[in-house]
Structures are given as C-alpha cells and as structure tokens.
Image (spheres, rainbow, N blue to C red):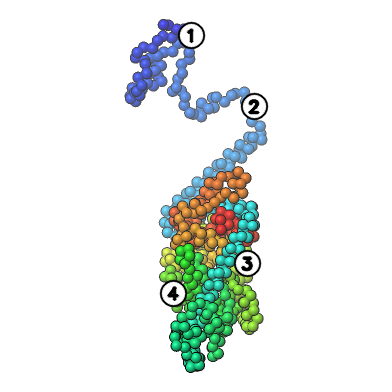
Amino acid sequence: MDLEVKGVAASPRSPTQTFSGRRKPLQQRWTSKSWAIRNPCPPVVPRLDLGSLVDSDDEEQDIIPEDLPAPTGKYKLKYQQYKTEMKEGYKQYSQRNAEKTKSNIRHQPSPRNKIDDKYAQGEEAITDDLTTLDRKALLQQRYADNPYHAQQSTRKSNAEIVAAEKKKQSVAEQVMLDHLCRAVISDPEQNVTTEKQEGACVLPDSNITPLRFRKRTLHEPSSTAAVLNLIRTHSTLTENMLSHKVQFDCRIISRNGRDACRELVGFFFIHDQSLTIYEYRQFGKNRTNVLPFIKKNTYSHQRGRRKGKQYQLGDFYIGANLTFLSSDHHRLPESIKENTLLILRITNIDLVASDYLRTDSVEHEDDTARQEANDRLIFKAIQDKLKEQLHKRGVRILTAMGKYFRQLDKEGNGLLDKADFKQALKVFHLEMSEKDFESSWLILNDNGNGKVDYGEFRRALIGEMNEYRKSFVRKAFMKLDFNKTGSVPIIDIRKCYCAKKHPQVISGHSTEEEIKLSFLETLKDACSKSDEVSYGEFEDYYEGLSIGVVDDEDFVTILRTPWGI
C-alpha cells in the first residue's frame, strides 16, 4: 500500500532495510555521505549534511546576529583591562614555572624539604582565609550554643565528685597503712612496750588475746582504723607526722595515652619534706587496688632553674611540674623508663591543707622565684601573639604541627634542635620576632645540649588548656579507650559520637550523619594512622579547638554533649 503525506511518497520497506537486531561491524557502518548517495531525499526535504557540523571559531562567528548594537566605550575599556590582566598573569605564571624548573634542576629536594613542602602546600595563601577543614572543625564549637542541661550536669557532677572522693580516701588510707606499719616494725619501743604489757597480763589462749596485748613487731592489722587506733608510740610521733601532709592529684605528661591517663595521687609530708605517689588502678568492674608508684623519700628538681634543689611546700600548686629521674624508680612501666625524665603535672590539690601548712612554714622568695616569674611573663606575651594567629585555625595547625614534629623526630626520643623549631614556625606561618624566639630558646634549653622536647616547646610558645579542661578531654578518651591501650579505633569513635544535640541538627540545617562525618574527617587529618586515633592526637584536636573557646563551661559542654560524659 502506497501512502503520500504532503506530497512525499512513502512505500513499504524492503526486506533488506529491516532492523536485524545486531550491530554491524565498523567497516560496514554507513557514513553520512554513503547513506545520502544510496538514499537520495526528495527535493522537498533539505539534505542534512552531518559532516558540516564541526566546532570552529569561524562557525561561531558566522551565527552571531549582525543587527547587534555596537559595544559602548565602557565595555571596550573593561575588555581591554581584562585582556591586559590575563596577558600579564600568564606572563608571570610562565616566569614562575621557568624559575621553578631551573631551581629543581639545580637542587634536588632532600627528605627534610619534602616534609616542609608537604605541610607548606596546605598553608600557602590561606593564612587569613579559612579552609574547608577549619570550617568543619569549628562546627564542634557550635555545641556551646545550646547549654548543657543544668540538672543533668549537676547530677553527673555530684556522682563524679563522690566517686573521686572515695578513690582519694582509699588511697590516703592505704598510704597511712603502709607507712605506719613500716614505722612500727622498725620502732624498738614496740618490743619494750609489748613486754611490759605481757608481764602485766598474760592470757592462756593467744588466739583470744586482745590485739593491744600481742607482740606487734610483725603485726597484721585487720583495717586501717585498727592501725591508727593501736599504733601510738612516744619516741616516734609517726601518726602525728604523717597527718601533716598535703594531698594532690597528678598526671604523667606523655604522648603515650596509657600513661597519660593513669590516676595518680601524691602526698607531700611537712616534717621531713618527703613525698610519695600512689596509683589508683581498677581491674574489671569491681576490683580495685592502690599501688605505690614513687616510694616515699626526699627528692629534688631534675631540671629548670631549681635543678638540684629539694622540693618544698611552695613547689606544689595546680599546674606545677614535678620531675624525677626514671632510672631511680624500678616500679615504673617500661614505656616511662624509656625517657630519662619522668614529668608529673599537678592537676588538683587540697587547698585547705596547703594554705594551713603554708602559714606555719617560712619560705623566703629568692632570685630563682623572681626569674621563674619573669620567664612566665615572656611566655605569656608570646602565647598571646600566637593565639591571635591561631584563633580559628587552631585545630588544623596544632594537629598538623604534631604530625610534622613526629616525622622530623627520627630517633623517637621527642627531641629536636633549634633549626627544626625555627623551620616549623616558618612552615605554619606563625610569626615571631627573633628576639622572642631567642629568649624562649634560652629558657627551654636549660641543659645546654642544643635539643628541646617538642611537646614542651609547643606548650611554652603556644600554651595549653588548663587542667580543668584537660580533665574532661581525658575523661572522654578514657570512655572510648575501654581496653586501656592508649589508642582508639576510628570505628569505635564513630559508634560513640552522637550529634543529635548539635544546633544545626536541631534546626534542621544538617543531618546527624553530616555533623559526624565532618568531625571524623577533621580528626582523621590529625592522625598518623588512618584507622585509629592515639591519645596525643585526640588531645591535639581539642587543644586546637580550645583556643577559640573563652569560657571553661562552654568548652566542657563541647565535650559533654557528643560524648555523653
């Protein structure tokens, strides 16, 4: 059947023109020209020449309408300026590339330069503008917009205070028990007193003899209270002397998370200027133990301006550092013995006892105290200047700086030289005058060996969180590190982090998953390993975040809300 539409004849397709359902080989495919030759179109329909559809500037110029108005002088001037700027920019770009190529040919990069370049790439041209990582890290500060529930916070705080007091009480009892027992065993008066008592009254059965009539050279007290009540000697005022003490909490300054989170309680005794430190340890859920960490003895400062001077009551305050030689203490863990010095930071102290005993003791201010006060003023001025530069990019800079120092520390002892620290300030665009740097180096390099611990260098120049804030950072990490290994897998952090109460989630601007991913991305950037976070890296993250948070309670809210502590 023949059909005709608008003068165009149509006929049934021949069998050779039916679709076979298979793709023909490339050699048998028709081009536009061959198809046109074999199937000529009627004169009414114009021939479509596919070969003429090419991209060219001439074609584009041909299709521009000719009736457009001529450009004004204003736009001609703008076009000329744009053209000149583009040419000048391309010229400068070509010159920089040529110089860089020549420089690369002359000087092969050393491993040190490669490390510097790696971190400098992320810092170049963004000293004022925030990067994506900066903005994602600053999202964590938004938790402070919604205040933590006061009732719930108070309830938790009260329970934590009660638990902490119980720990301290058990440690104090164990200390008194240990030292009173030693005093009684070594006191010759015990034998004389016991013989008189035995002569005055002798009972037939020693098992039912009252404890006060037994020979107590090697006694076995049933409780601390029994010891305190029964041991009373005239020649040695043991109970009296041990009661005049200052109790304090302290922590180990260490990059090792297992050591940094140890719970240590110390005692400084006034009568002989001695001190001892115990560790409160928990085994499982219900079993606890109090073990000696540093035995009772008189000790001296091992570094700083007071090196060689014996510890006095004035050396004990919140934020003070106590230094010991690791080789003098055999009970220390192997990870601590690797370092020459053991540094303990006092985190809390019995202020009532300290103030009471301080009024009785006479300690004159000497030149050393004045020099230390001057050192603190120098560091405070430097810290204020650098904190302005780190206000909104502290997380990125501090975490990257930690990785940078660890890569430079080939020996693994935490010590770097003067040139390393100068280069670090340059790489991370932290501006400091030469005078300030030399003054700080003179104070830090007190042993004169030309090397300084990079953790100490960073704490001195950039500063650090106060101990109240650090206690919550440790609390959050200890909740994550339930195996007490010092590092936490990223998968565990992902499970424990909760973004339900983030202001942007509450308002609907972001989802929980988006906030969680932004936190994990910025935290992973701080880590040397992609699948786990160490305590040092976790602390660096919140150290950088702390710089931009003025109020302590706001910072605590930032930690409490997502971690539920």
Circle 1 SS class: strand
- Identify which amino acid the numbered label 1 is placed on: Val
Mark nearer the N terminus (1 vs 4): 1
In the picture of the structure, the residue carrying the numbered disc 4 is 331
**In the rendered view, does 84 fall on the left or right side of 10?**
right
Please name whichever residue, 134 or 437, is drawn nearer the observer in this view of the structure: 134
Residue at image point 47% right, 9% down: 8
Judged by depth in the image, the label closer to the viewer, 3 or 2, is 3
**In the rendered view, does 427 fall on the left or right side of 410?**
right
Image quarter in which the C terminus is found:
bottom right
- Identify which amino acid the numbered label 3 is placed on: Ala
Q: Find residue 463 and report its horizontal and vertical position in percent.
A: 58, 65
Judged by depth in the image, the label closer to the viewer, 4 or 2, is 4
Residue at image point 55% right, 48% down: 515
In the picture of the structure, the residue carrying the numbered disc 3 is 381
**In the rendered view, does 38 fall on the left or right side of 262?**
left
Please name whichever residue, 176 or 492, is drawn nearer the observer in this view of the structure: 176
Mark nearer the N terminus (3 vs 2): 2
Label 3 neighbourhood size at 10 Å, few (<14), some (14-19), many (20+)? few
Q: Find residue 94 and report its horizontal and vertical position in percent.
A: 50, 46
Judged by depth in the image, the label closer to the viewer, 3 or 1, is 1
In three-dimensional space, the C-alpha distance between marks 4 and 2, rounded to whole angstroms, equals 92 Å
- Identify which amino acid the numbered label 4 is placed on: Arg
**Residue 415: mark in rendering:** none
In the picture of the structure, the residue carrying the numbered disc 1 is 5
In three-dimensional space, the C-alpha distance between marks 2 and 1, rounded to whole angstroms, equals 44 Å
